[in-house]
Image: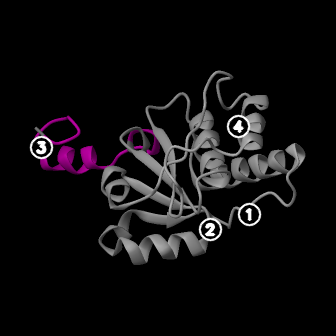
Amino acid sequence: MPEYGGSVNPRAVFSDKLMTQKTFMSQREICFVSRYDRVRGPICAAVFNYLASKMEIKAVSAGIDATAGFPVDTLTSQALKERGMLPKERILLTERFDKRHAGAYERLIGVDNDITMRVMSSCPSFALKLSSMAQDVLPPKRYELSEYFVVIDRVQSLLKMMFVF
């Protein structure tokens, strides 16, 4: 029996391996990689999970220079909660990116080119599952809630360019 179901007919086997975007994505877990996992990574993961809520897919975030277990930036959580992209009772904690993440997730996405290159240099064997956001996700310009909304909106438009939801 072919891996994705169907008959053993050679033509059917070939067509079974061709998966729709939804099927393809439903078999994946994604890790967004940022520097400290306090703003950009958690925003990318939360927005992705919000957009993909009808699909069987999950996104998480981790930071190359993060200290695991710290709460993410307060305004990050507040902005995501106000936009309805994070349950009000949920507390996001930072996660440190390491080779365990590289092996555990089907796709790694750097929030900017610098992060993507750092991941590639630290985990070269996982380069085929690594990509970068369509454009760099820049941090908020000021520590104001409105600036975090700008980042959320930017991430949402970039993810819609990159994925079929």
Look at the numbered disc 3 and give the secondary structure of its residue. loop
Could you tell me the amino acid type at mark 4?
A: Ser
Real-space CA distance between mark 1 and mark 4, rounded to the nearest whole angstrom: 17 Å
Residue at the (68%, 67%) spot, across then down = 136
Residue at the (53%, 27%) spot, across then down = 54
Query: Are the residues tagged 2 and 1 within 8 Å (C-beta)?
Result: yes
Relative placement, left or right, of 62 versus 102 is right
Q: Which residue is mark 4?
A: 77
Mark 4 or mark 3: name the one nearer the start of the chain: 3
Query: Are the residues tagged 4 and 2 within 8 Å (C-beta)?
Result: no
Look at the numbered disc 4 and give the secondary structure of its residue. helix
Query: Are the residues tagged 3 and 1 within 8 Å (C-beta)?
Result: no
Single out the residue that lies furthest toward the top.
89
**Residue 135 picture location, percent across and down:** 67, 67
Real-space CA distance between mark 3 and mark 1, rounded to the nearest whole angstrom: 50 Å
Relative placement, left or right, of 130 versus 147 is left
Residue interval drawn in magenta: 2-23
Query: Magenta stretch: residue 7 in it?
Result: yes
Foreground: 147 or 73?
73
Q: Residues within 10 Å of mark 2 (few under 14, many from 20)?
A: many
Real-space CA distance between mark 3 and mark 2, rounded to the nearest whole angstrom: 44 Å
Query: Magenta stretch: residue 83 in it?
Result: no
39 relative to 120, above or below: above
Q: Which residue is mark 2?
A: 112
